[in-house]
């Protein structure tokens, strides 16, 4: 939703926000200028997924779900698809099963109950058989799921190793905050402040203790300063945090994105 500009003309305001209806659990950029995200409703035990435009916040698709209603997660984004996983056993960390979704439409392209994702490269996906004693790995067509070969580690080990460790080129363009040293009051010994510096602006995130009696409660604040050091944006983005969580904001192509109360993604154009 768009926001009008209020106040002094030198101040900046959000240009859009997106609220999927649950806790924003995971967010990945795409090579087509968007975000694919995972939203979790812990009361209904339901997970859903969305794909939005990074510059406008418009939903390409949202509130989609595939596979097990709760024990399904976003594995990665590769090329024109989003890859989801379930778990080999509910509430256990090992991934199992694959769902491949078309990024443009949100349609399910294919699923494989007996395979788990290993890596992706080009128009191919590498998957491991869950029940294989020798952990045999299959090479599949990315969009159809059809098997096109078996992995030969002696031939293509480097290709798959490199691809499995990288999301994609879009992720390299994101600027994430760096902790400010020295440590600044975190009860766990870490820094409660972090910042991103750019051309003519600085974004500062900080945690302020509200109450140390009983369960620790903190307020997370986000501020933006212009080239003259003036504060042009100041907002509490989490009103009752129980612990310091890093990387709840980042910058991409001149726009600041942050999580508001863990439930909304908000965008602010930087000065």
Image (cartoon, rainbow, N blue to C red):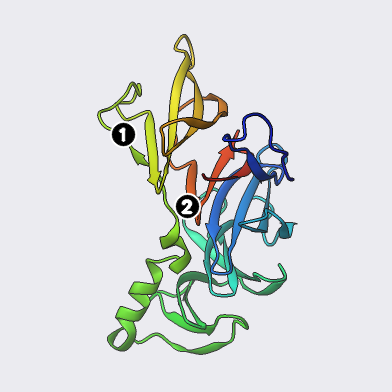
Q: Residue 268 location in percent, x, y?
A: 58, 44
Report the residue marked by disc 1: 180
Image-quadrant location for residue 240 = top right
Is residue 253 shown above or below 91? Answer: below
* Mark 1 neighbour class, 10 Å CA radius: few under 14, some 14 to 19, many 20 or more: some
User: What secondary structure is found at the residue carrying circle 2?
Assistant: loop
State if disc 1 and disc 2 touch (CB < 8 Å): no
User: What secondary structure is found at the residue carrying circle 1?
Assistant: loop
Q: Residue 75 location in percent, x, y?
A: 52, 61
Asked whether 229 or 214 is in front, the reply is 229
Q: Residue 251 location in percent, x, y?
A: 48, 49
The residue drawn where x is 40% and y is 70% is 164
The residue drawn where x is 43% and y is 60% is 173
* Residue occupying the far left of the picture: 182
**161 sits left or right of 200 in the view:** left
Is residue 257 shown above or below 67? Answer: above
Task: Give the alpha-carbon distance from disc 2 to disc 1, as whole Å.
Answer: 32 Å
**97 sits left or right of 131 in the view:** right
Q: Is residue 76 visible?
A: yes
Report the residue marked by disc 2: 93
Q: Residue 99 location in percent, x, y?
A: 62, 68
The residue drawn where x is 49% and y is 41% is 248
């Amino acid at each position: 939703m768009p926001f009008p500009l209020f106040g002094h003309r030198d101040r900046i305001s959000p240009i859009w926000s997106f609220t999927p209806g649950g806790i924003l659990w995971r967010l990945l950029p795409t090579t087509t200028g968007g975000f694919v995200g995972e939203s979790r409703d812990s009361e209904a035990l339901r997970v859903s997924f969305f794909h939005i435009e990074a510059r406008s916040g418009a939903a390409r698709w949202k509130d989609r779900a595939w596979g097990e209603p709760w024990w399904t997660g976003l594995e990665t984004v590769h090329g024109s698809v989003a890859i989801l996983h379930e778990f080999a056993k509910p509430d256990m960390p090992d991934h199992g099963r694959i769902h491949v979704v078309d990024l443009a439409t949100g349609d399910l392209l294919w699923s494989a109950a007996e395979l788990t994702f290993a890596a992706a490269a080009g128009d191919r996906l590498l998957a491991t058989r869950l029940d294989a004693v020798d952990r045999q790995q299959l090479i599949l067509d990315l969009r159809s799921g059809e098997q096109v070969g078996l992995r030969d580690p002696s031939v293509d080990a480097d290709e798959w190793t490199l691809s499995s460790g990288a999301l994609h080129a879009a992720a390299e363009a994101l600027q994430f905050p760096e902790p400010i040293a020295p440590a600044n009051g975190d009860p766990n010994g870490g820094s409660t402040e972090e910042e991103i510096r750019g051309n003519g602006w600085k974004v500062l995130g900080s945690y302020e203790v509200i109450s140390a009696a009983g369960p620790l409660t903190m307020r997370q604040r986000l501020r933006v300063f212009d080239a003259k050091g003036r504060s042009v944006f100041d907002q509490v983005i989490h009103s009752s945090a129980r612990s310091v969580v890093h990387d709840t904001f980042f910058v991409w192509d001149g726009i600041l994105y942050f999580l508001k109360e863990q439930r909304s993604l908000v965008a602010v154009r930087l000065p």
